[in-house]
Image (spheres, rainbow, N blue to C red):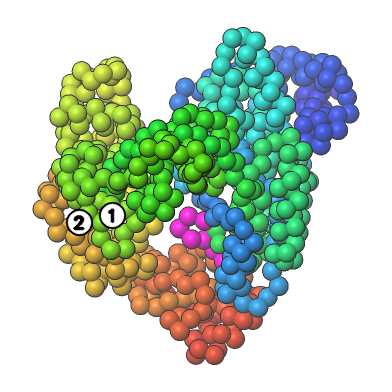
Amino acid sequence: MNIKQKIDDLRNSLREHNHNYYVLDKPTISDYDFDMQLKELQSLEAQHPEFYDASSPTLRVGGAVTKNFDTVAHDSRMYSLDNSYSKDDLEDWEKRIQRVLGDVPVEFTCELKYDGASISITYEDGKLVQALTRGDGFQGDNVTTNIKTIKSIPLQLKGDYPQKFDIRGEIVLPFEGFAKMNAERLENGEEPYMNPRNTASGSLKLQDSAEVAKRPLDCLLYGIVGLQTGITSQFQMLDKARAWGFKVPTVAQLCKSTEEVMAFVEYWDIHRHELPYETDGVVIKVNNLQHQEELGYTSKSPRWAMAYKFKAEQVSTVLNEITYQVGRTGAITPVANLDPVLLAGTIVKRASLHNADQIEKFDIRERDTVFVEKGGEIIPKIIRVDFTKRPVDSTPTKYIEHCPECSTMLERTEGDAKHYCPNYYGCPPQITGRIQHYISRKAMDIEGMGSETVELLFKEGLIHNYADLYRLSKEDVLPLERMAEKSAENLVAGVKASVEIPFERVLFALGIRFVGETVAKKLAKAYKNIDALMTATAEELVQVDEIGERIAQSVVEFFKNEANLIIIQDLKNFGVQFELSADKLENQTEDLKGKTFVISGVFEKVSRDELKKMIEDNGGKVGSSVSSKTTYLVAGDNMGPSKRTKAESLGVKIITEDDFLTLLA
């Protein structure tokens, strides 16, 4: 046998044994024999570097050091899930699904929601080529080197896998491994880790992959993203992933009704404590992938999936003081400062009180004993007061009347949940909050600068608005506390590089009230440049898809303000992008302006996503369900009969894929 054959045989043998042990939990050889094969392979690979293979089992031991994790865009966005907490929530969700799909049978796949760190792993030709954290959903950190050390993640697939695809899942730390890690830390006189989820997430960003390899991390996969996978349902997707070598939990069930879904939820709400991993709910997905495409997405979540959260953990503690925070828009948020208490694996010291109405509703007072819950929200909340422990000299909470930062009289208009400080241009937290928003990852993504740096720059009088960032020099920032020469250079370079950020993100970065990421993209696409947007009236703005009166009025008021116009002119002078780039303007027309399309079925020449893009690029609007406002129903193969029936009853014109392409010819 030649050397290459020997190396290939050892690699195949180790991959198989690794799969049996870490994925199937059915080892077929002893640890000693496995280690001997691994050492033999390491020796042969060292002697024959010409046979290097990036997917070799020897690379799992780690050793590579990553000082900076590159940020990489996801090929397909990683969405978050909407949460539900009752059967009523699920039934409402099912009704929304049926309104879009019509009167067709809908099946659901139920899977446990494992509490870990989300990951997206890319495979090409069966080999692991990239692993990205979730990040902000649009882009994540490249942690490929660390991910390769996790033994339940295959480096080389088997079977009939697609040429290229992404697979999504959770990096988790089993309870047993977490307990062993903490026992070792205590033995060494170190503080124990607080909970498995945060420890798993932190492990992915360790610089030394050899340290990651020492941690008993596991990976549970649940979703495949990619073209031409040949998969037609979520349940089939799970089976395929297992066949290709992935560790996919066997706790999954196909359900035909919300009654069956609730039976699954109720069973696992009790029996989840028998599992080796943290779980915090059940993920319910529409099983049919074509139905998923029909349902599509909101700006944040898929319409075809829902997370049912198990009942949240609650603890009681004492509320010592109510303080008030001022947000970048001037919104006032009352905060409960608590006696520190352990809740769901973390020490909680503060909880949001939301607004004056909640304080009044629950009659929350300082020195009360309160019950705190950490459920679907990241920030803990107070759910009730233990009135039996209220001090006899307790007095009702009087909500503040003046801004705690600038003493301006607060305002609260009808319909607003919160009080606001109207001193938009003079209140320090509002000024720094807008700048912090401007530099944030989803906006201008200025590297080398964080919230604390912004506070310091403002305190030192170096910046008064986000345009001032572009005036900073290395000499300006070097004297700042904890600012070394390299840090100062990086900060200035990061600001300079931000002039390449595209217009739609710049528009979001400006911090116009009610203009989030999705609205900013809609406005940028509709108006193409800032000058056209600045002159738009509220009546014109509401004609743009998803722009209502409140958003329109906010945009008009923002551009009426002289201070804002001066800042925008400054930003223009510094080279910030205030118009859509040439590549985004290319092939864009107004040919479909004023027309609304609903897409249904399977298409041959272009994908559904491409159809949607073509409609939007040419000024049209994509609707999710047929209504009297629909101009055309674009009908593909296997279209739901209810949509056709509704279109016919409303007199909506039904066109084929070829008809649509002819419209743009």
**Residue 184 x %, y %:** 66, 14
Residue pointed to by mark 1: 513
Residue 299 is covered by the magenta coloring? yes
Q: Quadrant of residue 195?
A: top right
| Labels 2 and 1 touching (C-beta < 8 A) | yes
Q: Quadrant of residue 519?
A: bottom left
What is the span of residues highlighted in magenta in the rendered image?
Answer: 293-301
Residue pointed to by mark 2: 558
Determine which of the numbered discs, if any, sits on residue 64 in the image: none
Q: Is residue 209 visible?
A: no
Residue 147 is covered by the magenta coloring? no
**Residue 302 x %, y %:** 55, 58
Give the residue drawn at x 56%, y 34%. 343
Against 262, residue 18 (above or below) is above
- Disc 2 is placed on an element classified as helix
Going by the numbered disc 1, the residue's amino acid type is: Arg
**Residue 473 x %, y %:** 18, 27
- Disc 1 is placed on an element classified as loop
Against 411, residue 61 (above or below) is above
Front-most of 224 and 214?
Answer: 214
How many numbered dots are placed on residues in this image?
A: 2
Q: Is residue 430 left or right of residue 134?
A: left
Against 412, residue 19 (above or below) is above
Quadrant (top left, top right, bottom left, bottom right) of the C terminus: bottom left
What whole-number distance in Å separates the C-alpha atoms at marks 2 and 1?
8 Å
**Residue 111 x %, y %:** 70, 51
Front-most of 436 and 32?
Answer: 436
Front-most of 239 and 269?
Answer: 269
10 Å crowding of disc 1: few (<14), some (14-19), many (20+): some
